[in-house]
Structure formats: C-alpha cells, structure tokens
Image (spheres, rainbow, N blue to C red):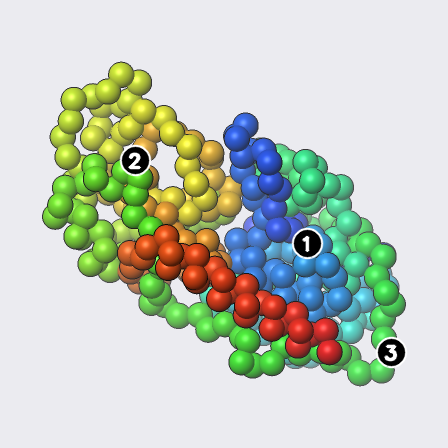
Amino acid sequence: MFVEVVEPGLATTVQDLGRTGAYNVGIPPSGALDQRSARIANLLVGNPETAALLEAPYLAPKLSFDGPAVVAVTGASAQVLVNGEERPSWSAVRVDAGDVLSLGFVTAGARVYIAVAGGIDVPAVLGSRSTYVLGGLGGHDGRALVAGDRLPVGEAGGVPAGDQLLRTLPERYLPTWSREVDLRVVLGLYDYRLSAHSRDLLVESDWRLTPVADRTGFRYQGPQLDFIEREQPFGAGSDPSNIVDAGYPIGSIQVPSGSEPIVLHRDAVSGGGYAQIGTVISVDLDLVGQCAPGTVTRLVPVTLDDALKARAQARENLDEVRAVLAD
C-alpha cells in the first residue's frame, strides 16, 4: 500500500526514533523531536515504537490512501479531518481506499506526528529511516516531502471493519502545550566562562523563542550575556564565547558572542568551538520540539540526579501508556 502526498505541508519528513552510533563521525541522530508523541502514535496503530512515521511542523500535509489503513495523529493540537469530517487526535482511526487525511492549523504545540499501521517503509540508512535533510540522508530521498510523493507502507496486521474509531489514549496521558514553559537544565561544562552576573541572568530571565527554531536548533532572545575575558587559547576563536573545539551533546546550550542562546536539537552538528553553558535534560527535549516561536521560556537549573529521576518518571509514564494501549 502507498500513502500519496496531496499537499506536503511546511516541512514534513519521515522520522523514527533516530540513528545511533554515527554522531562521533558527525552524523546527528535525527529522529522525532518529540519522541513521546511519536512513540504513542505508533502504539495507537499497533506498530513497534521504532516504526517510521511523519513529523510535520506547524502546517501538516494532506494525504490520500490507496487502500484501507489505520492511522493516528498525535503531538501538537490540530483538527484532524478525514474527507473533511472531524476525527479525534491521539486515536487510532480507520481510513479506506481513496480517503483523504488533512489537518487544520496547529493551535498549540508545534509538531504533529502521523503514524500508519505497518510504518512508512522507506529504506533504513545506518540503522534508521529518519530524514537528515541537511545531509540528504535517510527518509524519502533524504528530503522533506513534496506533492506527488508516494510513500510505501509496510505490512500491517489487517484493518478492522466497522467503527472508524478504534482506540483512544485516555485523557490523563495527554500532554498540554503552553506559551510559557520551564526547561530543566544541567549547567556546565563551560558555564564558568560566564560572568557571575550573566550566570544569574541566564537562569533568572525570561527567554523568548525566535522564529529561528528548527530541527537543528532553537534560538532565544533575552538579555545580553557576558563572558569573562581570557587570553585566547591556541585553536580557539577570539570571541570570549569561543573554546577549543569540543563535542556537543544534544540539548546543549551555546551563546555565540553572548547573544541569543541556542538549544541544539536532533539534527545539530556534533561539535564545534562555542562554549556549552548547559544542557537541557533529555526528557524536556520533547517539550523544546513542541515550542512555537514566541514561547516564553525559563531555564531552570537542576542536578544530574534530578535529571535521572525525571527520566525514570517519564519512562514509568510511558510504561503505563503501553499497558493501557495493550488492553
């Protein structure tokens, strides 16, 4: 079976949970920016959580199906329509051959995820079907979708007849998207390069997400931060925010020249010469991916133990979702 792209949306790509093992040679993990929403979309349609699906920021694609299928839309809030008739999000919905799935404008959050039972069956590259557009790697021809693309769908377990609504995630597990968010951050490795005043500003200020917010990084506006003057090390740039090149963890925060902090996300480069003054904890990266421009953001310092505890809680929540959807 194929899914045909009638309208591509803004920058729709094929993603899964990402590729591992190549970041050390400069190939980022890619994969869904909101991993929880992607996992749940796949669970709803009966796929393995690692199956490939579509990620669509802000403006979703219009899709048609050449056979019966089960689909689910999760992530950002948007009206889900099949042939113009509303269907629930965070639900498994049956569609028939010739049906057209479309979405309204995103009203909260930033990215929707569209899963099809069987998964989007593009070739795996380095162990993943995720698209890395900047490198032309993976996904559908290594690029965002365009009108007329035909996406193969893998084998599924059959499409139940009867009701169009097959399964819904209970409301208590639904996320809420806000225009004001707190991101938990472990400070370091180079926060000592900031002046004491700027270190306070970093965690006490409101930062506003700019329109420069994509799969590579999210740039924020706020007060100017000052780095401590130092003697330029061999191999580092002249600006005080420069360091001798180092590896960048996903979620790390750099502030070139002290203006506009950038949170690196899943398509980011693996290293460079900007000081990393902190790292957004892994479970909050989903939230970063759902922030739209203009979102007021506070950076809340936490310890590494706090980060590990938050990750354990997120895993427990996902275990509950798995159990609920397995019934």
Name the image quarter holding residue 113: bottom right
Report which residue position mark 1 lands on: 50
On screen, residue 25 above or below 34: above
Helix, strand or loop at mark 1? loop
- Point out the tag, 3 or 1, that comes first from the N-terminus: 1
Asked if disc 1 and disc 2 are in contact, CB closer than 8 Å, the reply is no
Looking at the image, is 326 positioned above or below residue 153? below
- The amino acid pointed to by label 3 is Ala
**Mark 1 and mark 2: Cα distance apart in space:** 33 Å
On the image, numbered disc 3 is attached to which residue? 161
For residue 205, side relative to residue 326 (left or right): left
Tag 1: amino acid: Thr
What separation in Å lies between label 3 and label 1 (alpha carbons)?
26 Å
Q: Using residue 229 as the reference point, say whether residue 172 is left or right of it.
A: right
Disc 3 vs disc 1: which is toward the camera? 1
Q: Position of residue 310 (x, y in %)?
A: 43, 62
Identify which amino acid the numbered label 2 is placed on.
Answer: Ala
- Quarter of the image that includes the C terminus: bottom right
Nearest to the observer: residue 161 or residue 97? 161
Mark 1 or mark 2, earlier in chain: 1
Mark 3 / mark 2, whichever is N-terminal: 3
Q: Residue furthest top?
A: 234
Residue at screen point 53% across, 80% down: 172
